[in-house]
Amino acid sequence: MKGGVTEEHLYLAYSHQSEDCIFPLHTSISLFLLSYCDCKLFKVFLVPSSDSTDDQLFGKAQPDDLEVHFVSRCQLPLVVQSCCLPAIVEEKGKFCRAGLSVVLRHIIQKTYEIDPSKKLVLELLGFKKTCLKACAEVSQWTRLCEISIPHAVESLLNASPDQCQAIPPEVLLLEKKLGEPVRVHNDDKIRRQKLQQQKADDKTAAPALAKRATKTLSPEGNQVDQAQKEIVEIKDQEPASLELRVAFSKLVGQEIPATTSREPSHIRKTKISDLPPLEHVFAEGLYFTLADVVLLPCIHQFLVFSKKHNKKVLDLPLISSWYHRVQEVPGVKSTAAKCNMQFLQFPDLLSFPDEQLRAFCIIPDDLEEEHEDNQFIGGPRPTMTKLTESGIEAKFSPHPCPRWTLDWNSLPAAVSPGEGKMSSDRALRKQHQLNNLVSMVTKLSKPGDVIVDFCSGGGHVGIVLAHMLPSCQVVLIENKELSLERAKDRSDELGLHNIWFIQANLDYFKGTFNIGVALHACGVATDMVIEHCIEAHAAFVICPCCYGFIQNTVKFTFPRSHRFKEVLSYKISLWTS
């Protein structure tokens, strides 16, 4: 305990380091955020990737205001050994958070919780605190920031010189995304302000340009060049764009003064489709967020590598503007200095000719976001009819063991799903579902087994299993923090000792287990759970999701079976029943 706050341990992987970077990049990103937030709440451990890793070389890239310890992987808490790093675990070792986005979001939330004056730190989580909250398995943006770009840059740094001629396609994809129109809350109002500013700027600039244009009629030879120079000077003296003013006003805790007069009628009457789009200031739009913190060390290392190896850098105007702009965010330069990160200036970097630029601007199909027409055809009933017409029918049979049931009245109240903040009717239906799942798992299990409740939510399945099977270890895996904390509260009330809680994406759980369970894992998550269990050679008891749509993801495309592919299209098979 530190000042009444439960101490948490942060575990970071460590393979090697350069002058200003610790690898893997996830570790450098985590240390950069700790320093930026001025967070001293965690005891930080580096976990060498092998016994031969030389921890004596560590030092330069470590923030100079942060104490770091070394620990071998075999010394990690058991729950952490089951997860990919980075990971944070509470002192008692029952609740673990794993994966870069989950860990970074927790650092931010904890920093603000302990010191509410650090409002700008909390703002890193963005609008409605959702920055990098979506799972990388289903969100292309989270996957690009959390996985694709860090791994691509590391692969570039580790490649031989003859294998690193091209720019990583993941970096090209970031450049493309920075050029897409920004969508923000209340953007209609901001876009109208931008239109009004553009028209006002045009009126101001026109007389000055006309005056200088008359000089081109002069017989003096250098007047044309001088006029062009003055036009450039006018542009340099133009006020910062509305987007920049909005972004940096927020960073310094100021609001842009609202206009006292009403917008002109021609501005108010302009159609939304005719309003000028908002341009990116930072990675996710107008505001500096956690995504910028994640991307900065990665893009910096990409640029450092290019300069060091005298490689011509692809002309990435949007990324270069972003790279310089991020440096002007309060606290970024001082944090970089603590981490021994020396920012580059782009005059030091060379560009490709235009023809080479076009040759490199090819993004592989697997990185491109799908833009299929998502106007779904039909629904559950037409889909079932089409299957029936093709000889595919659902077959129903009597319940094999209709007497399977738990004596809920004899169980502690915290075991009941009604304790998980749901209505009595829904809790009763949940009990019926649990009767079947728990009975099947009980028949499959033996003492010492590890049972994983994937997509556990509030722990309705896992808590019953932990209570009914005290000789088994039960692991709850869930990405939503509030749901998992609610499950932990119920577990603490019951005094369960054979249960772990892991807030992480499915892919970040690497532990061995005997039985996998999932009740209503939404959409594609059910397929991911089944695949995870098959790869682990584990038995599984699954009740699929009963609502919504199944969507193609990076990992899966639908229909999955050959038989269904012969009958259904992607759009038709999206419906579930």
Image (cartoon, helix red, strand yellow):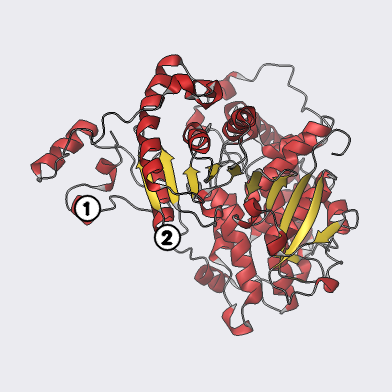
* Percent coordinates x, y for residue 462 in the rendering: 50, 37
Q: Is residue 27 above or below residue 245?
A: below
Q: Which mark is residue 49?
A: none
Q: Which residue is mark 2?
A: 535
Q: Earlier in the sequence, mark 1 or mark 2?
A: 2
Q: Check contact, mark 1 vs mark 2: CB within 8 A.
A: no
* Percent coordinates x, y for residue 476 in the rendering: 54, 42
Mark 2 element type:
helix
Gap in angstroms between the C-alphas marked 1 and 2 = 24 Å
Residue at image point 53% right, 44% down: 471
* Percent coordinates x, y for residue 319 in the rendering: 66, 57
Is 7 left or right of 566, judged from the image as shown? right
Q: Amino acid at mark 1?
A: Lys
Q: Nearer the viewer, residue 159 or 321?
A: 159
Q: Can residue 425 be seen in this snapshot?
A: yes
* Percent coordinates x, y for residue 320 in the rendering: 69, 58
The quadrant in which residue 61 appears is bottom right
Q: Amino acid at mark 2?
A: Glu
Is 524 left or right of 481, judged from the image as shown? left
Q: Which residue is mark 1?
A: 565
Q: Nearer the viewer, residue 466 or 326?
A: 466
Residue at image point 72% right, 74% down: 51
For the N terminus, the quadrant is top right
Residue at image point 13% right, 44% down: 392
Is 148 left or right of 238, judged from the image as shown? left
Q: Nearer the viewer, residue 304 or 246?
A: 304
| Mark 2 Cα shell of 10 Å, populated few (<14), some (14-19), many (≥20) | few
Mark 1 element type:
helix
The quadrant in which residue 133 appears is top right
Residue at the limit of the structure toward the bottom, as seen here = 162
